[in-house]
Amino acid sequence: MSRRDDLIARVVAGYREAFGTDPSELYAAPGRVNLIGEHVDYNDGLVLPCAIDRETIVALGDGPEARIEVAALDMGEGARDAFRLDVPVTRVDGEWQNHVRGVAHFLAEGGHDLKGARMAIAGDVPIGAGLSSSASFGVAVALSLSRHAGHSLAPRQLALIAQAAENDFVGCACGIMDQMASAASAAGAALLLDCRTLETRNVPVHPSLAITVIDSGIRRSLTESAFNQRRAECEAAARHYGVASLRDLTPEALEAGRGGLDDVLFARARHVVAEIARVEPMAEALASGDSAAISRLLTEGHRSLAEDFAVSLPALDRLAGEVGAALGSAGGVRLTGAGFGGCLVAVSDAAATGDIMAAVERDNAGAEIPARIHRFSPGSGAAPIVAG
Ligand code: GLA
């Protein structure tokens, strides 16, 4: 059985066990890996993520009128929730429940009436690895609840609803990148997204290149508070410069207006300005297969995340150093996602993936937790498997 068939079998069995009948609809939304443009989405910047071959699947069927019943199969024994649709949907103590409730709330608020449903949810995006298990969960729920009620929402609407749920119901001040990558990606391509306008362009990955995710095995901790703190620091820096967001700051204005700005806030702003400037060149290099340019851009990106944005860890720097040295100009590697653990992403000549593997093995010899390698081709965004 394929990975997806396994996951479908698991979610269908979970649905039967929870509700005693078969589901009639199935929907999927993928996780993502970000190639460049880190911590810039909430600064209105440019990002370049792509969908991975790991996803959340929702099995769904009719339920009692005006009531949603949910079984979250990966959230421990008997993880269930139920709420009514004929009164305002509210938050509860907990996390995954608020993704579902938040999505239902914001769909209704946007004028999309919902229908009662039973749903079982399961996924294989590793949690806490920087591959957006939350966004894939939220987008899968938004797609399934809206389709079940007969609404056909554009990917960008699904993404905005899942993001609003995460911001206002779950309490994470995330940007829009992850949800857009999960909702709007195209197979074989990375998604160049302007987070200010939400305009997108598919950037085909040159066939000579390979994308490799290196999971450090270190699961992030304290992310939410550190993440929200980074966001607040960026906003404080933007206020210092008198711009709406750091997207509006040129490298010249960054230096010229530095006077009176705290060193930490300056470093945060310097990361954002330099990182946004790396995105278009990375898109060009990805499309043309220019691995030397990719090597330079990803190496600079990692250094900037580690030194100026301070979201790396010594173990991740060491791993990135080993892999980067092994690749030379045949590709690059950097921390991906929010940081404080999780994954590195390498983009390289396909012929150099053996060098990545050898470097990771060398690093594993001295590491507390062994890193694991995953190669994949960019997949497509959220879609029904069996629509209602
Ligand atoms: C998390 C957030 C995203 C983005 C990245 C960092 O994944 O959910 O919105 O800010 O971190 O680039």
Image (cartoon, grey):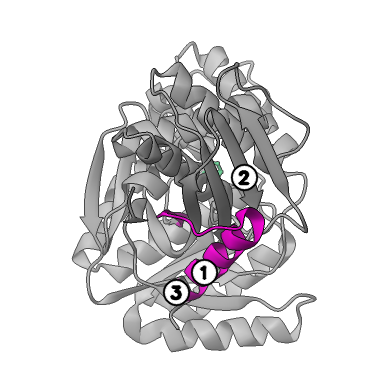
Q: Amino acid at mark 3?
A: Asp
Q: Which residues are magenta?
A: 5-32
Crowdedness of circle 1 by 10 Å Cα count: few (<14), some, many (20+)?
some
- For residue 330, above or below residue 254: below
Q: In the rendered structure, does residue 328 fall within the stretch colored magenta? A: no
- Asked whether 220 or 265 is in front, the reply is 220
- Asked whether 57 or 330 is in front, the reply is 57
Q: Which mark is residue 195?
A: none
Q: Amino acid at mark 1?
A: Leu
Question: Residue 279 at what x, y percent from top left?
Answer: 34, 46
What residue sits 64% from the left and 15% below the top?
260
The residue pinned by badge 2 equals 70
Secondary structure category for the residue under label 1: helix
The answer for how far apart the CA atoms under marks 2 and 1 are is 17 Å
Q: Nearer the viewer, mark 2 or mark 1?
A: 2
Residues at circles 3 and 1 in contact by the CB criterion of under 8 Å: yes
What residue sits 44% from the left and 71% below the top?
4
- For residue 132, above or below residue 152: below
Quarter of the image for the N terminus: give it: bottom left
Q: Which mark is residue 7?
A: 1
Question: Reading the chain from its start, which is encountered first: label 3 or label 2?
Answer: 3
What residue sits 74% from the left and 35% below the top?
225
- Asked whether 246 or 388 is in front, the reply is 388
- Classify residue 190 by image quadrant: bottom left
The residue pinned by badge 3 equals 5
- Asked if one can make out residue 46 in the rendered structure from this viewpoint, the answer is no
Question: Residue 167 at what x, y percent from top left?
Answer: 59, 28
Name, please, the residue furthest toward the left: 288
What residue sits 47% from the left and 48% below the top?
61
